[in-house]
Amino acid sequence: MKTFFKLLFAFSLGLAMAGCAKYDDTELRGKVDNLTSEVNTLKANQQAMQAVIDVWKAGGYVASIDDSVPGQHTITFYGDKGKTVVLFDGKQGEDGKPGADGDAFFKDVTSDENGVTFVKQDDTKIFIPFAKAFKLVIENPEAEVEAGANGEFAYKVENANSTTSVDVFAGGNYAAVVDAEASKIVVTAPTPAVNGSVLAWAQNEEGLFSMRKLSFIVKSDLEIKTKEEEYQAIPAEAGDFVVNVVSNIDIEVEKPTVDWVTVAVTKADYKLTLTLAENTTDKPREATINILRSDNMKQVQSIKIIQLAPVKKVLTVERVWGLYNSTSDVDWFKDIEAGGTKLAATTDRNIAMDDKYIYFAKSSGYPAIIAVDRTAPTDATKSKKLNIDGIAGGTHAISCVRVVKNTDSSVNGGKDILLVSNLKGDYELKVYAYLNGIDAAPTQVLIWQWDNHANASDWRRYGDKFTVTGTWQSGAIWFQGWSDGKAIYFPLKDGVIDKPNEVSHVIDATANAIKDIAVYPGQEAEVLVTSYNKAAFWTNSGTKNDNKWVIWNEGAVMDNLKNSYGYNFFKFNDKKYIAYTLVEDTTHSRLQIMEDSGAFKASLDAKSGLIEFPLQHASDFKTASPAGGGNNGDCTVRVIGDEVFILAMHTDGGLSLFKMYMKAEESSEPK
């Protein structure tokens, strides 16, 4: 035994000594490295092959394949099983590249548009399809709902497999279940209905996942209350038009695509205010207004508006009604009655008019003021006598009525004011105003006696007729002497008629009686004075006589305007006009209307746009009225909205009410 160990030791020592000698093992090491590489490659091929088989068995998919290197296939699988492997065709050579003996696991790998085919050495084939998107698809995932209502939503899962499942989660008091057999999701809305959502998702054991959201909004209940024929026939003029809407949801309006209309929404009561520019074209035009939900800005309704083409209009004057003298008994007075009082022949020397009534001053017999309905002058039930308490004395206790413009809402309820004058034989002038409506007693606003400033015997019969210029807040009251050629005026300021120290005195060189005074608005220097046989403009001389009266000088004489009465200056349709009554003689009279050029005399000279109507007879300027017609007249004008009413009168001959307005050209023939 000892001998054996000695030999073993000697052998080992010999080997050690031999190892200490210089020996080149490069070739040996190379062979070992190659062997190791082959083993590793074999192991990698085994792992790649196993990966292919695992994916194939699991029903997996190929995400991509790269064949850019000859004989080598770089394959990436899809999903959490997904990994990248490299496979080679044929024999594995020493340098790690393919050789052609065919001792690799797969002798061929091919691909087409459907997938990849792996061919084993024994010609067995494994096919793995290319991956397609795993997706839960739900058509129309947004819906309107009502309280407690059910909704069904069909679904499908693209590229599903046997392990695919679908589930849901409902929020906001909604309920939802999945009917897998019918491939639908059933959702129940809460009561009351509120906006909400449901989450639905699909997944499989490969870890593929797809989620969708179902959104629910309360069903809109929106109704257009404005009739369609109204918003499809909007006038051509610029202005606002309101479309009334009833809605259970907040709404907005989409900006119109046209530039001639804008829309504002008043959410308190849901009114759509359409602001339209004027249609200056010769055709109608239309626009679509889209109404949207405020919560998701989706359209819930649209309306089509149509703005009409402009209609050409012409200035038209028509007779509304006329009451005419037909016999010597002046029958037209008998047609008007108020409170048992009939008009008399001397009642119609002057007239006044407001929005509702025509006023006559009854001066003879016993005093009275009669209000006649403008729309029904012969209906006794619509006429009435006014309260005249406090008006007393005088040759003509009630002489003249006028309506003065009032701009103060605290006076007479903001309405215009009726004035009446009282003429007394003992040189005393009084003026009364209905400051609390025409049903209350009037208030005395002026009393003036002649002998304060002139000879007491110089009685001029002031108060028979008067003219008001301006307003109750800033104007003047002008009185003419009935029996001589003199006149006075009283400044009027905030309802106060100034005292005689503010009074001016007009002196006519010819001393003819004055029947009417007309003062051009804002130009008191242009004063037209008319009588039976003369008409002339007067100018202020700026000097006074011994009695402290301002002296006015007679200017231009216009005989063609003698016997003209009731000059009215008014605006209509952006133009100014002058209207008055012209009495040719005791049996012929007419209404004259002309454009105002901006100066009194120049306008009367030019007579631009002159319109004339006979007063006694609607069809003939020259047909005489029966005997008894007076040589006097009056005229008054009232602008109401877009119409002008003109009342013209010839004493004892009759009166007519005319209407001026803009009429469509197609039907502009006068009545």
Image (tube, rainbow, N blue to C red):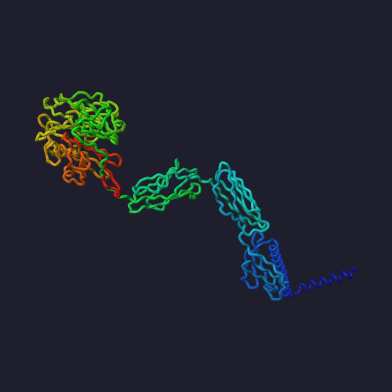
On screen, residue 644 versus residue 558, left or right, reads: right
**How many circles with numbers are drawn on the protein?**
0
- Residue 451 placed where, x, y %? 14, 25
Q: Quadrant of the N terminus?
A: bottom right
Q: Quadrant of residue 49?
A: bottom right
On screen, residue 333 versus residue 112, left or right, reads: left
Considering every residue shown, the one lying at the far right of the view is 1
Q: Is residue 37 visible?
A: no
On screen, residue 250 versus residue 391, left or right, reads: right
- 628 or 145, nearer to the observer: 628
- 216 or 508, nearer to the observer: 508
On screen, residue 116 versus residue 254, left or right, reads: right
- Residue 671 placed where, x, y %? 26, 44
- 251 or 441, nearer to the observer: 441
- Residue 346 placed where, x, y %? 19, 30
Where is 444 relative to 70, above or below? above
- Residue 632 placed where, x, y %? 17, 35
Q: Is residue 237 visible?
A: yes
Q: Quadrant of residue 129?
A: bottom right
